[in-house]
Amino acid sequence: MTDRWHVEVDRDLCVGSGMCVSSAPEAFRLDAARRSRPVVPDREPAEEVLAAAEGCPVEAISLTLAGTGEPVFPPED
C-alpha cells in the first residue's frame, strides 16, 4: 500500500508563476487571484507533483505523508 501525499500551497508565498500547473496540470490550478491551489489536497504520490514542488520558484509547495505529516518535500534538514 502506497502512502498518500498531502499537498499544500502557501498562498502568501505563491506568486502565480504557473510553473506547477505546467508541470502537473492534473494536480494544480490557478484561481482568479492567480494563486495556486491543489486540485485534491490528498493524493497518490506522483513524479509530476514532486517536480512541481521542486520547481516552484518561491518554494510555496509542500508535500507531506497524509497519515503522519512526515515531510516529503522540502525534506527536513
Image: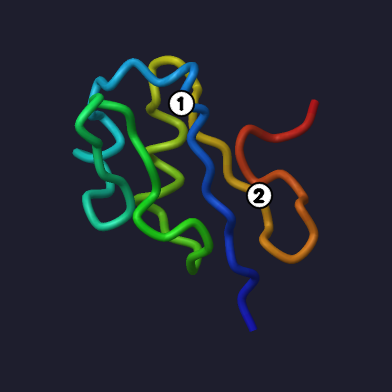
| Residue located beneath label 2 in the image | 64
In this rendering, is residue 42 above or below 18? below
> Could you tell which of marks 2 and 1 lies nearer the N-terminus?
1
Residue at (48%, 35%) from the top-left corner? 9
Q: Between 37 and 71, which is closer to the camera in this rendering?
A: 37
Q: How many marks?
A: 2
Three-letter amino acid code at the position of disc 1: Arg
- Label 2 sits on a secondary structure element that is strand
Q: Which quadrant would the N terminus be assigned to in this image?
A: bottom right
Q: Describe residue 64's horizontal placement relative to residue 48 as left or right.
A: right
| Residue located beneath label 1 in the image | 11
Camera-near label (2 vs 1) is: 1
Three-letter amino acid code at the position of disc 2: Thr
In this rendering, is residue 48 above or below 5? above
Instruction: Point out residue 14 in the picture as x, y percentages from the top left corner.
Output: 40, 21
Crowding at mark 1 (Cα within 10 Å: few <14, some 14-19, many 20+): some
Q: Which quadrant would the C terminus be assigned to in this image?
A: top right
Q: Between 77 and 33, which is closer to the camera in this rendering?
A: 33
Residue at (57%, 37%) from the top-left corner? 62
Crowding at mark 2 (Cα within 10 Å: few <14, some 14-19, many 20+): many
Instruction: Point out residue 49 in the picture as x, y percentages from the top left corner.
Output: 40, 49
In this rendering, is residue 15 above or below 77? above
